[in-house]
Amino acid sequence: MAILEILEFPDPRLRTVASKVTEVTNETRALIKDMFETMYEAPGIGLAATQINVHKRIVVIDVSEDKSQPLVFINPEVTVLTGEPHEMQEGCLSVPGFYEDVTRIDHVSVKALDKNGKPFEMEAEGLLAVCIQHELDHLNGKLFVDYISPLKRNRIRKKLEKQHKANA
């Protein structure tokens, strides 16, 4: 297993739309293990393959406090079920140190393949529903900063670019 590099905004590779996984292989399962290790180390509650520069439709999530509920979504598709849009503060491993309010639906259904390639469907509410939508955005080349004003987004971009130069 390995800790993988997480791409940071404004890296243009984060805008790549991920392609469907056609076959779940041992290589896919190894990638998923590395994604969990990377996510837990960061620490975060969700990671899309796009964030580690692998442009496949794979997401790992664990919203539990004790890292006991790992979820894998391969080729996920989300359907909004019910509920009013709610505002929740979001952060992102690709936008480290920044948190902004984002409005999302808090009750969704998701269809996907598990780590063994078996199809499943589940309902999610609250933080899990928000996390699923956030990670699926990554697979479509979208970031949570796309939901905030251009002024705030540019300010975040400039601060991160300055940090990247200082660390280079």
Image (cartoon, helix red, strand yellow):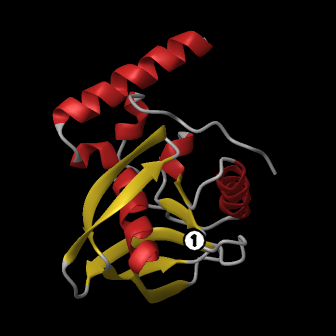
Category of crowding for the residue at label 1, using alpha-carbon neighbours closer than 10 angstroms: few (below 14), some (14–19), many (at least 20): some
Residue at figure coordinates x 25%, y 44% from the top left: 146
Residue at figure coordinates x 69%, y 56% from the top left: 40
Q: Is residue 13 above or below residue 77?
A: above
Q: Relative to the observer, which residue lies in front, 159 or 36?
A: 159
User: Can you give x and y, in whole percent of width and height, for residue 91 in the image?
Assistant: 44, 50
Is any part of residue 54 visible from this angle? Answer: no
Is 134 situated left or right of 93 in this image? left
Residue hosting label 1: 63
Q: Is residue 112 above or below residue 143?
A: below
Which residue lies most toward the right here? 1
**Quarter-of-image position of residue 33:** bottom right
- Say which quadrant the C terminus sits in: top right
Q: Is residue 155 above or below residue 82?
A: above
Is 17 situated left or right of 48 in this image? left
**Quarter-of-image position of residue 16:** top left
User: Can you give x and y, in whole percent of width and height, for residue 166 in the image?
Assistant: 56, 11
Residue at figure coordinates x 36%, y 66% from the top left: 133
Q: Under tag 1, what secondary structure? A: loop
